[in-house]
Structure formats: structure tokens, C-alpha cells
Amino acid sequence: MEVHYFEKPGSENSSEVVRLTLKRARELEISTFVVASNSGATAELFLDQGVQVVCVTHHVGFAGPGVDEMDKERRNSLEERGVKVLTTTHLFAGIDRALRLQNGGLYPAEIVAQTLRLFGPGVKVGIECSVMALDAGLIEFGEKVIAIGGTGRGADSAIVLTPNHSNSFFKTKVHEIICKPF
């Protein structure tokens, strides 16, 4: 197994992430991809590739009160093509983030998130989105998945993991890193 490192983070790596993850999925016989995609554009890169795509978006209100970053037409199009789309509160945010923003300080969920960011924002996002998808019943318990995340827009990181539910988060197993920025 080889880890691919990108010189820089960002969306310019998206097409290579698609290539690397599809190759590794075939090798490992993994058919479920959890893709972080706020607008749906990154999720669309995995359409018609023979894999089941679960697209996890920002929660409504992330970009501003009442704002859903994925327009209804794209959401409908993804769902019509078999993509499961999840828009919900983020595992490492929610009430902890509200407390931090209002009162300052650091709370347990944000400590975990900051620790995972040591491996890069996309790796942290991949883990977080996979647990969220499992909690929502969109992937099977005990199933290995490939999770794709990024730094800002697009994809620059991919991992193989077996997520666990949020109430037993620390039983999540990251099996390998497929790619990530330095």
C-alpha cells in the first residue's frame, strides 16, 4: 500500500483523489464512499463509477442563517442518481461550537476535532462525515468505507476506515490513508 502526498492542499487535487480512491476501492473490494461535499460538486465526481456514494454536506445555517449550500436542483439530481445526501449537525460542532462562540473556551468535541486536524483537515472531515453517515443509517455498521474530504473546496484527502457510532466514536478504526496533502 502506498500513500500519495500532495504538495499543496485544495481542489486542484480532486481528479487525482478520484483516480486513487477508485483504484484502491477495487483492490480492497470496497463499494461505499462517504464524500464531504457542500455543494454536491465533489460528490458528482464519483457518479457512474460503480460505487455507492453518501454525500455529507454542511448543516443548513453553516454559511449563514437559513442558508443551505446545496441547491435543490443539485440535491434532487444526486438523489435521482442514487446518491444518499445527508445534511445535519456536524459531529464535532453542534452545541460545543455554540458554547465556544458565545463564551470562549474549548470543549471536548472541538479538542477531538483539533487533534484529528493534525493529520489534515480532509482526514478529520472524512472521519467526521463517516460517523455522521453511520449514525444516520446511510452506511452499514461494521462496513469498511472510503471517506473523502478536503481543505476548503474539492477533495485532497482519502482514507479507508470502519466508522463507529458517535456514542462509541473511539472504536472507529482508520485502516489507511490513501492520499493527503503534506
Image: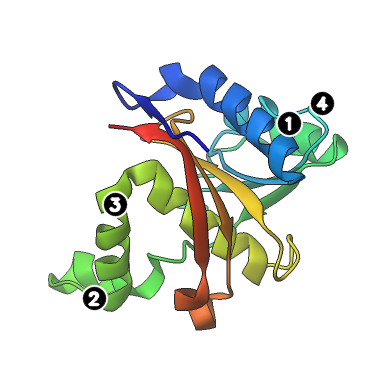
User: Which color mode does the image show?
Assistant: rainbow
Nearest the viewer among 68 and 161 is 161
- In the structure shown, which secondary structural element does the residue marked by tag 3 occupy? helix
Task: Estimate the x, y position of residue 3 in percent, counting from the top left.
Answer: 44, 34
Q: What amino acid type should be assigned to the residue bearing mark 3?
A: Arg
**At 44% across and 50% down in the image, what residue appears?**
125
- In the structure shown, which secondary structural element does the residue marked by tag 4 occupy? loop
What label does residue 48 carry, if any? 4
Task: Name the residue tied to disc 1.
Answer: 73
**At 39% across and 52% down in the image, what residue appears?**
124
Report, in whole angstroms, how far the alpha carbon at label 4 lies from the one at label 3. 31 Å
Report, in whole angstroms, how far the alpha carbon at label 2 lies from the one at label 3. 15 Å
**At 25% across and 74% down in the image, what residue appears?**
99
Q: What amino acid type should be assigned to the residue bearing mark 4?
A: Asp
Task: Name the residue tied to disc 3.
Answer: 117
Report, in whole angstroms, how far the alpha carbon at label 1 lies from the one at label 2. 37 Å
Residue 170 in view: yes
Contact check, label 2 and label 3, Cβ < 8 Å: no
**At 64% across and 60% down in the image, what residue appears?**
133
- In the structure shown, which secondary structural element does the residue marked by tag 1 occupy? helix
Pointer 4: residues within 10 angstroms few (<14), some, or many (20+)?
few
Pointer 2: residues within 10 angstroms few (<14), some, or many (20+)?
some
Q: Earlier in the sequence, mark 1 or mark 2?
A: 1
Please name which of the two marks, 2 or 3, marks the residue nearer to the observer. Answer: 3
Q: Earlier in the sequence, mark 1 or mark 4?
A: 4
Nearest the viewer among 131 and 88 is 131
Task: Estimate the x, y position of residue 94 in percent, counting from the top left.
Answer: 40, 69
What label does residue 107 carry, if any? 2
Q: What amino acid type should be assigned to the residue bearing mark 1?
A: Glu
- 157 with respect to 32 (left or right): left
